[in-house]
Image (cartoon, helix red, strand yellow):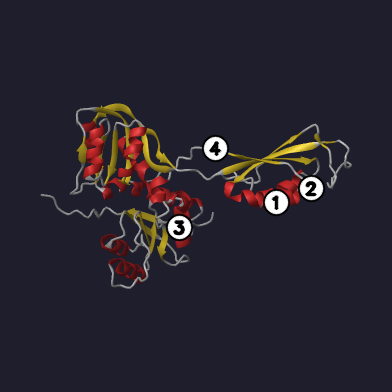
Amino acid sequence: MNEARTPTVADVVAAVHGRYDPAWAEPWDAVGLVCGDPDAPVRRILLAVDPVAATVEEALDLRADLLLTHHPLLLRPVSSIAATTPSGRLLHRLVRGGVALVSAHTNADSAPGGVSDALADLVGLTAGTPLVPAAGPGRDKFVVFVPAGHVDPLLDAAHAAGAGVIGAYDRCSNVIATTAGRFRPLPGASPLVGTVGVPEQVPESRVEFVAPRDRRDVVLAALRSAHPYDEPAVDVYELAATPSGVGLGRVGDLEQPVGLGTLVDRLASALPATEHGIRVAGDLDRDVARVAVCGGAGADLIGAARSARADVLVTADLKHHQVLDAREQGGLALVDLAHWASEWPWLARAAERLVADLAVHGTTVEAHVSERVTDPWTARR
């Protein structure tokens, strides 16, 4: 039996991206490896919401080799990482201590099993779905008829161009034999079979496969190059997007309706305490059955929560006028958590799955969750 090996920084980044694909991050976001040698070994990981002095020192005290945070350290482009700025000092401290830094931000917000799913589970949602589903990658379905005996070369060309991938499978296609393809070559044609001016009938196969929409031109060029006809007929259908479970926020129903006050008490007992506390805009005595959640700043999802017929939206960073407008419209209650607290429940889930995902590849690592409160508010009077 082979002994488990120590993963590298590159292994950990691949495992993180396997769960929280960078393609799911918002366009303005900055996720992935911030500092660290991809070939360096990783024996111990610390997970935290924020890359701040407290969590960097915690990682160093723990003798961690990698710090995985939800929030990015360098969200905006910089021209220098000199130790004359807070972020520069943190990077220098990490590099000197041999600690790699990786972030999974809005890609972890949108991912199945990510930040909002962790909050949805804590609230008690059953079968929560994305509140704002992400647009899945566009796909086309190609249909082409080819004479018998020429199917395999045609498919080889299509697959080489990127067609035929469905989930964890490639070279996917459907081939149906037909009685005959009918045509009449006109003057100027160079028919593979038949004579100019004479109607022809040829046994053909109907070949179907899918391809990413952004590969359409490449696949079409490959088909035309590999097809034995000088004028191949190719149909291209744009496929409708299918639900992927990826997207911002979650919405679903509680197993049993509860009072809004009971829901808030449930959150208060499950989330770490902060000076921000939990603020509520709504009648604590009203029953709520359908709940929307969004870990982190979710004010932009108020309209989506209302459209989803949610009774309450649980999120963070709500502003005065946003709440006032929602109250004036009526119907939707709002629960405002501390930003840090709303995202912290994800860390334990991410740690558990990261260890499991690395174990599948024969590597072993320790993962620890930071319990240091890095919410910026320190007092309330």
Give, as a three-letter code, the residue at label 3.
Val
Q: Position of residue 376 (x, y in %)?
A: 22, 55
Label whose residue precedes the other's in the sequence (4 or 3)? 3
* SS label for mark 2: loop
Give, as a three-letter code, the residue at label 4.
Ala
Q: Position of 66 compared to 262: left or right? A: right
Give, as a three-letter code, the residue at label 2.
Asp
Instruction: Characterize the local packing of mark 4: few (<14), some (14-19) or many (20 or more) Cα atoms within 10 angstroms.
Output: few
Q: Position of residue 253 (x, y in %)?
A: 35, 30
Q: Position of 36 compared to 323: left or right? A: right
Q: CA distance from mark 1 to mark 2?
A: 13 Å
* Residue where numbered disc 1 is placed: 222
Residue shown at 45%/62% (left/top)?
9
* SS label for mark 4: loop
* Residue where numbered disc 2 is placed: 230
Label whose residue precedes the other's in the sequence (1 or 2)? 1
Label whose residue precedes the other's in the sequence (1 or 3)? 3
Residue 240 marker:
4
* Residue where numbered disc 3 is placed: 13
Give, as a three-letter code, the residue at label 1.
Ala
* Camera sees residue 267: no
